[in-house]
Amino acid sequence: MATEIIAGLGDVALFAIPGFALADLVPALRATPWPRRIAYGFLLGVAAVSGTLYAASHTVGVPLRAPAVWSIVVLLTGTGVVAAALRRSGRPRSVRGRHGAVKFLPLAATVVGGIVSLGVFADAVTDPVKDFDGRVTWCTQARYVRAAGTVDAEVLHNGRWSISHPRYPLLLPVAQVAAQEAFGADPEKHAFRAIYAAFFPVLLLLVYDGARRWTGRSGAALAALLIAVLPVFRQGEGSASSAYSDLPLACFWGAGLVLLVFRRGRLETGLAAGLLLGAAVLTKNEGLPLVGSALLIGALAPAVGWRRASAARRQRFRRLAVASLLVFLAVGLLFSWKSGIPNREDEDYPARLANLHLDRALLSQAALVVPAIGEKMADWKNWQGFWWMASLLLCIGWRVLRRPVAWRLLAAALTPLTVGWIAYSLHWAPAHLAAVTWDRFLIQASVPFLLLIAGAATEVSRRAPGAPLVGVRQGLSRRPRPPRAEPSNAIR
Amino acid sequence: VFAPEFRLTRSLLVGVLLSAFLIAALPRAVTYSFRRLNAAVLHRHESDDAAATRLFGAETTRALDLIREALRPGEPYILFDDDCGAARFWVRNALAPHPALLISHQLKRTTRLRWVSTASLRVVVCNEDGSPPDFYERREFLAEQGVLDGH
């Protein structure tokens, strides 16, 4: 057990350390408190290390072995460390903590989030992979890729061999292989499950970070607390206890979205957002439409005065262009990799789309799909009445939708659900597919949706008579703002 | 827009909603965590084999170990599937990275046996409903089925 714990922590550190160094290159992340910076760092680490290995293996045939993994880890860590050293030797910068009195909700979220994260990690180091898709798809792919030493394994390319979903993007299996190769792990060991488990605290910190910028500490803590107690995120198919790619996709896409929507900043922010969104593309097939929506939402200007804010607007579009460039590279890699793999044992949605009238199909399957979706969302075991509570809360706090950013979050939250609906409309067994996958689409939508919930709750609480001013920096503050001298793209 | 009393009611309603949800969900989350931590302590000295046995059953684990031993490194095998469920996927995962040639239960029996007889692979892994997977040399398997090898 002790060896599994150490190996699991080592696997997580393999990505968190270079990622943390990379996060230090991004001013917007550098200014973030260290727990949240580690969360972003872990995501950046998985994206950079695994993405580079994926690209290097496919394009120039670099073998997926320990020397390649360690070279990339050392290179990324070294870059971050050198950049940090150069910056510090130039101009010392004082970092002042801004700690106020600890409030109840942030404390509760920290304690509960910590306890549940420990439980998820304990599960990862105790049991082998036991969830269906984790065993059948993702970990099986990882075994084939590791044995072949390349993402273009013969088993994938030769249509004779049986394999589920051979054209699913492989970022997470490559991360798993990287961790196993880096430490020479036995194929039967399951310490790599810690990588999947790590996405749970990362999601909590990510939601906290996004909501913190919009609603303040209490709203952010509420959003994180809701995720921490929801069973669907910690146990069962698609959760952090499984080896599915849905939670990682929620994190990559959500983090990219948060950076694009909530962070002002320089090109480095665009670079980080592009890296995260590129990782989302390489994580799951749904990643592509989700990332498209994130870029579109990022492009929709947060109410900037056209005459006064041309500098801010230019900056934002430059940032978006950098992010888009990395996304295009990831898309190119994905299509190039897929092109050599014959499809079998998988739904061919593009072909079905070509043979169907989507407009009719979207409605014709509704009678089958809606009951299945309703049943999933009302399932007490996984959601514990969350959707009843969330629907009422959004109705009560509807005024949050007066803010443009709330509409952008709503649009983002609806994207995975729309993708799911389209898939059901094209499928020959839509009710079954909805019953199996709807929870996973909801997991993918979690970051923007929870931010919206936090916004609605904060909006109601700040309008209560005698309510204290919520410690809000942007967006929902009651505090009158001084007139700005410079144009801004502040969140509204 | 709203009177102060109404705003207070809204605020209280939101508080009640969130509290009710947290009261319902929080104990289960904490219990889950402690159960998992307890399991981690209980199984702290467990080997990988023992963990697999605990989760997947002794017979299945043993059967898969035997098949792994029978296969040469990287050797492909025929997965003769007689199971209507999803067990074939679990077998395929357990035997990965050995490539599997799946002979699906959906095909006619004669077609399936013809595929087996013409596939130039040595080992046939049989996956039957409700029992652990078993394996044969291809000739032995075909002889049992009353089919000549290569026909």
Image (spheres, coloured by chain):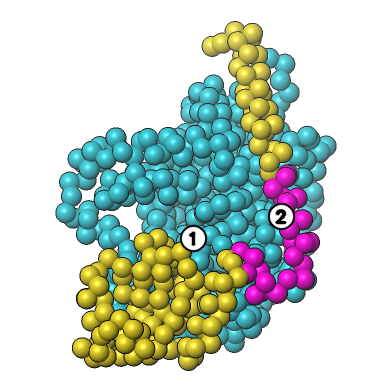
Chain colours: A cyan, B yellow
The residue at 59%/62% (across/down) is A196
**For the residue marked with disc 2, what is the amino acid?**
Arg
Where does residue A179 sit, x and y in percent of width and height? 61, 75
| Frontmost residue, B20 versus B1 | B20
The residue at 77%/62% (across/down) is B42
In-image side of A306 versus A266 (left or right) = left
The residue at 36%/69% (across/down) is B82
**For the residue marked with disc 1, what is the amino acid?**
Phe
Where does residue A144 sit, x and y in percent of width and height? 46, 79
Where does residue A229 sit, x and y in percent of width and height? 65, 42
Residue A107 shown in magenta: no
Mark 1 lies on residue:
A132
The residue at 66%/69% (across/down) is B51
Q: Which mark is residue A203?
A: none
Do the residues marked 2 and 1 share a common chain? no
Q: Which mark is residue B36?
A: 2
Contact, mark 2 vs mark 1 (Cβ under 8 Å): no
Q: Residues within 10 Å of mark 2 (few under 14, many from 20)?
A: many
Where does residue B15 sit, x and y in percent of width and height? 66, 24
Q: Which residues are magenta?
A: B30-55
Does residue A109 show up?
A: yes
Q: How much space separates mark 2 and mark 1, taking CA atoms?
A: 20 Å
Image quarter where the N terminus of chain A lies is bottom right
| Residue A236 versus residue A186 in the image, above or below | above
Chain hosting mark 1? A
Q: How many marks?
A: 2
Residue B32 shown in magenta: yes
Q: Main secondary structure of the magenta part?
A: helix
Chain hosting mark 2? B
Does residue A259 show up?
A: no
